[in-house]
Amino acid sequence: MQQIKEYLKQHEQRFINELIELLKIPSVSADPAFSQDVFNTAEAVKTALEQAGCEAVEICDTEGYPIIYAEKIVDPSLPTVLVYGHYDVQPPDPIDLWDSPPFEPVIQTTELHPKGAIFARGACDDKGQMYMHVKAVEFMIKTGQLPCNVKFMIEGEEEVGSKSLASFVDQHREKLANDIILISDTGMIANDVPSITTGLRGLSYVEVEVTGPNRDLHSGLYGGAVANPINILAKMISSLHDEHNHITIPGFYDKVEDLSEVERAEMAKAPFDVNDYQKALDIESIYGEKGYTTNERNSIRPTLDVNGIWGGYTGEGAKTVIASKAYAKISMRLVPHQDWEEITALFKTHFESIAPKGVRVKVTPHHGGQGYVTPIDTIGYQAASKAYETTFGKKPIPQRSGGSIPIVALFEEVLKSKTILMGFGLDSDAIHSPNEHFGVWNYLKGIETIPYFYQYFAEMNA
Ligand code: BES
Ligand code: MN
Ligand code: MN
C-alpha cells in the first residue's frame, strides 16, 4: 500500500475535481422538485464506479430513488467488504445563509481546515465521504492491490428514511453477502485526534397537530375564552422535560442501558473543551440533562427535541388572531435497547393524554430506526484502528456518536454482519446546515486510510 501517497499526489487534483462535479448536482431527496437531479446523480455514481474499475455496476430501480450496486470480486474465497454510502443530500435551506451557492462548490480555508475545505451541500454528508471509497478502490484496482472482494451499495434516500433500501436488502441477501460493512458517513474528533465511531443513536420522528376552534378567530373577541392551540402546544411541549431536563414520558427510560463507571471514565478521556464548544456555537452556557457530561448527553443519552413549530400568523407586521391549529415536528434520539416503535407508541399515548379539554391532538409518526453499537474486540474494528494508526500516526479513540443511520441496525439484522464506521468529517463541518463543507485534507486522508483497512482486514482474516 506504500504507493497510496504517490498515487494521491499524482491524482489529487482530479479527485477533487471529480467530487466538485458530483456536488454540482442538487440531489435533494426530500423535495420532489429535485427528482430528476437525484436520478442524474445515480447515473453519475454508476459511471464513477465503472471508471474506478468495478464490475457488475448496476442501477437498481426501486419505488423511490435507485440504489447503485457494484462489485469487484478478486477471489470468492477471500473476505468481502460491503461499502455503503448515500448520494442524496439534505435540502439546502435556508439558502440566504450560505456564503456561496450550495450547489456551486468552492474551496475556502477555515480555522480548522487551513488546507482548504470544499463548501457545498453534501460535501461531507455524504457525497464527499462516499466518494473517498470510490477513489480508494480505484487506487487498489488500478495498482492491482485489492486484497479482498468489495461490493458497493450506494442509496439515494438516506436523508428521508432509506425506505427502498430496507426492502432491497431484504430481497438481495445473497448478492449482498459480506464479512464486514464499511461506512464513511460520520465524523471524528479532530484532525489531530482521530476517532472511530462505535455507536449511532436510534430515532423516532413524529409530527403533532393540535386543533382548537373550527376556524381562526379574532384574538380580542375570543381570546381568553377558548383554548388557543398554539399556547396549548407550547405548554404540552414544555411539559415533556422536567426541571432536570429529564424526559417525562412514562416508560421512556425503561430500556435505557446505564453505562458502568468504568465505561463513563473511558469516555471522559476523549478531549473536550467546554469553552471552545461554547465559543464555536456562540452560547454562554451548555445545557442538558442533569448528571451527565456534554459528550454523554449527545451520545449515550436519549433526547427529545422540537425540530420545527408553526401555526397562526407569521407574516409581516401584526395580525390579531387565534389560530385554529398548531403543529410541531419532534425528534427523539434513542440509545441501544430502546425500540423506536415502542417509544413512538409511548410518545403518542402520553401526548394525547396530556391534551386539555378544548383541543384535539393528532400524533403522526414519520420515520425512525434503531440505534447501533459496534463491538471493538473484532477483526473489523482492529483493522480500522490499525489503518488510522498507520496514516494518522496515532491510535484512534472509539467514540459513540449522537447521529443516526437507521439502516445500520437493519444490516445487522438481515445481513448478519457488523458495521465499521470510518468517518472523516468534523462536527464543525456544518452538515445539514448552511455552509456545509469537507476538508480537502480530510477527503485525501480518507482515501489514504481506506486501503489500509482492506489490507489489514484481509491479513487478519487470513
Ligand atoms: N450522516 C448522517 C448521520 C450522522 C452524521 C451520524 C454525523 C453520525 C455523525 C445521516 O445522513 C443523517 O443525517 N441521518 C439522520 C437520520 C435520517 C433518518 C434522516 C439524522 O441523524 O438526523
Ligand atoms: Mn449521511
Ligand atoms: Mn444527513
Image (spheres, grey):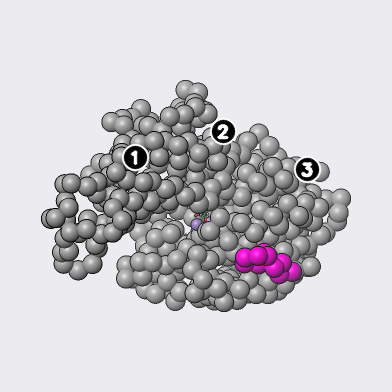
Would residue 135 be seen by someone viewing this image from the given angle?
no
> Residue 423: x and y, percent?
54, 52
Residue 17, quarter of picture: bottom right
Mark 3 crowd level (few <14, some 14–19, many ≥20, 10 Å Cα): few
Residue 95 image position (x, y, % from top left): 36, 70
Q: Residues within 10 Å of mark 1 (few under 14, many from 20)?
A: some
Callout 1, which amino acid?
Ala
Marks 2/3: CA–CA distance: 30 Å
Residue under the image location 64 percent in, 41 percent down: 381
Mark closer to the chain start, 1 or 3: 1
Left of 299 or right of it: where is 11? right
Residue 427 in the image: state x and y as whole percent.
Answer: 43, 52
Mark carried by residue 461: 3
Report the span colored magenta: 58-67
Amino acid under label 2?
Answer: His
Q: CA distance from mark 1 to mark 3?
A: 57 Å
Does the segment drawn in magenta span residue 78? no
